[in-house]
Amino acid sequence: MHGAVLRLLSEGQPLSSLTVSEVAALACVTRKTLYARFGSLEQVVKEIAYEMFVKAASSLTDELLTGPAINRELSALVFRALREDQQTLQSLMTQCPSSLIIEPSGEVFRALLDRVITLNRYAPLTEFERDYLTAIVGSTIHGMVLVWIEREFVDSAEELAQLFGNVMGPGFELLLQRTSQ
């Protein structure tokens, strides 16, 4: 079902124009199967996005997450992984509501944030700090990726990582170090 949704999105069809019947037929399943597995096309998109972000984060070892939480090497790995899924990324970002992309990226970011806090022995963030930090980072990456797509991926992952680190790094580190144990 992922492939069917991605195929239709990559053909330039916005998610809002897709029907469960159309996706189910293309995936060679019944509507009932699609609804039983996902509940909606929006849930299919969220799962695709979640899996893409998990894959991008999977190369982030504990060693990379020890030390500055936002560093060039770590960010470049994530942007390179996203570039590997360029077609999926472009289809999701241009044909789907941003909330369907930002929510799954936030889930993955929260898991990474937990690892960073544990590995670096920072004090846990308050719910307020965690929620807003997740929103800030997710929105920033979303905006950067939209521009990257508009620029047809001409910028390197390293350039994006440098920019992201310069903008996000100091404040992020200040917040985490302020709460260190």
Image: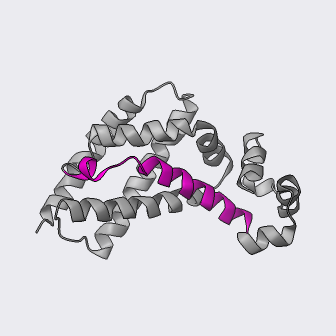
Image-based side of 13 in relation to 167, left or right: right
- Vertically, is 78 above or below 129? above
Residue 11 at x, y = what percent?
78, 40
Q: In this view, does 28 lie to the left or right of 93?
A: right
Residue 53 image offset from top left, x and y in percent: 50, 52
Is 40 magenta? The answer is yes
Q: Can residue 100 be seen in this view?
A: yes
Does the magenta run of residues contain 105? Answer: no
Position in image of residue 97 (x %, y %): 63, 56
Does any portion of residue 13 appear in the rendered image? no
Q: Which of 66 and 109 is in front in this view?
A: 66
Q: Is residue 95 above or below residue 123?
A: above
Pick the quarter of the image with the N terminus: bottom right
Q: Residue 19, image x and y in percent?
A: 84, 60
Q: Main structural element of the magenta stretch: helix, strand or loop?
A: helix
Residue farthest toward the top in the current orientation of the protein: 154
Q: In which quarter of the image is the C terminus?
A: bottom left
Q: What stretch is highlighted in magenta?
A: 39-66
Q: Which residue is drawn at 84% across and 73% down?
A: 32
Left or right position of 130 against 5: left
